[in-house]
Amino acid sequence: MSAFTSISAGIEMRGLRKVYPAPKPRRGRGAAAGLAGPPRMPPGAAMAPTGGTLTAAGIVALDGLDLSVGEGEFFGLLGPNGAGKTTTIGILTTRVLPSGGQASIGGADVVADAVAVRRRIGVVPQRPNPDRGLDVLENLTFHAAYFGFPRAASRARALGILERLGLADRALARIDALSGGQLQRLMIARALVHEPRVIFLDEPTVGLDPQARLALWDILRGLHAEGRTIVMTTHYMEEAEKLCARVAIVDRGKLLACDAPEALKKQAPGGTLVELTLDGEAAPAREAARAVAGVLDVVSDGAVLRVYHPQGGEAVARLIGVVQGAGRQVTNIRLVPPNLETLFLSLTGRKLD
Amino acid sequence: MAPARETPTLGAGRVFWALLARDVVVVRRELVYFLMRTAMQPLMFAIVFGYLLPKMGFVRPGYTSALLPGVLAVSLALAAVQSVALPMVTDFGFSREIEDRLLAPIPSSLVALEKVVSGMLQALIAALFVLPVARLIMGPIAGLSLAHVGTIVLVTVFGAVAFSMMGLYLGCVVAAQQIGLLFGIVVAPMIMFGCAYYPWRGLDAAPVVKYVVLANPLTYISEGLRGVLVPAMPHMPLRAVLAALTVITLVFWRLGLRAFMKRAVG
């Protein structure tokens, strides 16, 4: 099925670690400000980490990540902001140096053989970073030229890609004239123009309207059908479920689970999640809820009470009664069938977004 | 779309050439703004000190012989520093525009070197533009000679490279918010105390200043151009000028490359 027959385009990560320098506490506010505040953007980090765990050594963005992505696979990295997804992509695309461990693409080490790695990959960044000195078409032809394709020869292919991504009429437009969705598609076009076999996309659908998101999904499916290896980060469950053959769930720099979405869903705690939002602290209602017939598990999280029950709906009336018995009122109810979201909640204790 | 294939194996030279071609396209598009930015300041000096003041009799007409090489040196230095540092500040700033070039399959140090070469070429363009215009403004200049074309080109290229290296360093260490400060506290004093508007030997009258200006890279390019363009005027020996410019180039390449790599790779 793969169109690539030469070198493998598989990705290997072994014990990958990344520790960013700890932020310097602001003068006059004490160390607490440094702990509470967002981590300092590392100098020149291709993509800044948005989270991570602050330790004495610094901010641990990746804590011993082991992963393999097969050639031609559509692979998803799923996790909340600060899980380490962007740092992982940064290391794999040679833009961030790992603090420890190893990573390779098609056998080429991302540190020792960065140039060979760059030749194999296309990168769609989280925030579009087009070359604003050039127009849309030039962004593509020059990018191809950086990879050794003569500009004249790549012009036709660049126009073809723009056509396919619905940007043909914008070929000669200035970058400033593009909309957010068009910019995102230009970034995808740029990642394709030098015909890489591995494509990395970092949160490609953030900020897109639903229609543009669906269009992008179709584009990505098409790229995958051509035999390319695709690695995508997302914090949208639905996106990971619909597109990826395998999904790795990461949080706080660690791998929590990795499997096909269907297999992962089976790992989710049994039953439907009944999520009740109360008008106050949910803890007092927890034990009473646990006593309701059929309830598998109960977790309280602030004003939210999460109850797992085989049927869900049947338990709602009784759960409301239990909550009222504990002196609380229910302000909202949500029923979630077993899916990646419920698995994620059970693995990390927190929601994705 | 054609099925994907392995990118052709290519030498770093070809990639370097493509990076340079990109800068040529961008510079050509903004040539007028580029010349206004880099030539305006030295040419205004040429008008005031090389045309108005001599006409009023406040300075002796022979002063233009000392001034013309200095005006040329300032435009060369300004063009080189600005051509490298200004885009670098935005490239590494919020927009991270340089990202697509850092993903090119060559060592990142070559991306930095390309910026320096591009800055050098832009400095030469600025010098080529300013020389005839300044000469037109100032009128005939006593002792001006273009006979030593070889050494004129040599000094100009050495100067352009040294200041492009300086631009690399400044562009990598200065944050976007402080770019105004860079020109206020680095570039402006450099221009005034770089022997551009007076010959170094003239500073015999002010011995402390004479030795302080030796720390200013502009001094060497001003004196070097004075020596090759107006050989009759007392000037620093060419050998000392080239040696100093070589040291400046090496120091700023080392500092600049380190700063560049620190910002390029997280």
Image (cartoon, coloured by chain):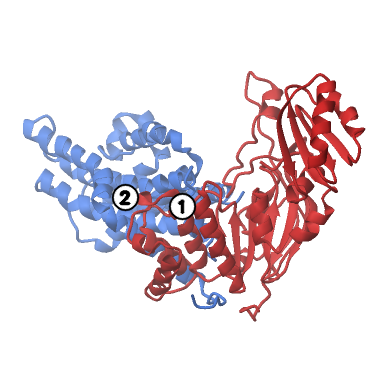
Residue topped by disc 2: B224
At numbered mark 1, what does the secondary structure look like: helix, strand or loop?
A: helix
Tell which tag, 2 or 1, sits nearer the viewer. Answer: 1
Q: Left of A244 or right of it: where is B252?
A: left
Q: Which x, y percent locates residue B243?
A: 43, 52
Report the quarter where the C terminus of chain A lies.
top right
Residue A181 tag number: 1
Q: In this view, does B60 lie above or below A105?
A: above
**Amino acid type of the residue that numbered disc 1 sits on in the rendered structure:** Gly
Q: Which x, y percent locates residue A187?
A: 49, 58
Q: Do labels 2 and 1 share a chain?
A: no
Q: How many marks?
A: 2
Name the residue: 63% across, 18% down.
Answer: A28
At numbered mark 2, what does the secondary structure look like: helix, strand or loop?
A: helix
Q: Left of A338 or right of it: where is A124?
A: left
**Amino acid type of the residue that numbered disc 2 sits on in the rendered structure:** Gly
Chain A painted colour: red
Name the chain under label 1. A
Q: The blue chain is which one?
A: B
Q: In which quarter of the image is residue A49?
A: top right
Q: Which of A244 and B148 is in front in this view?
A: A244
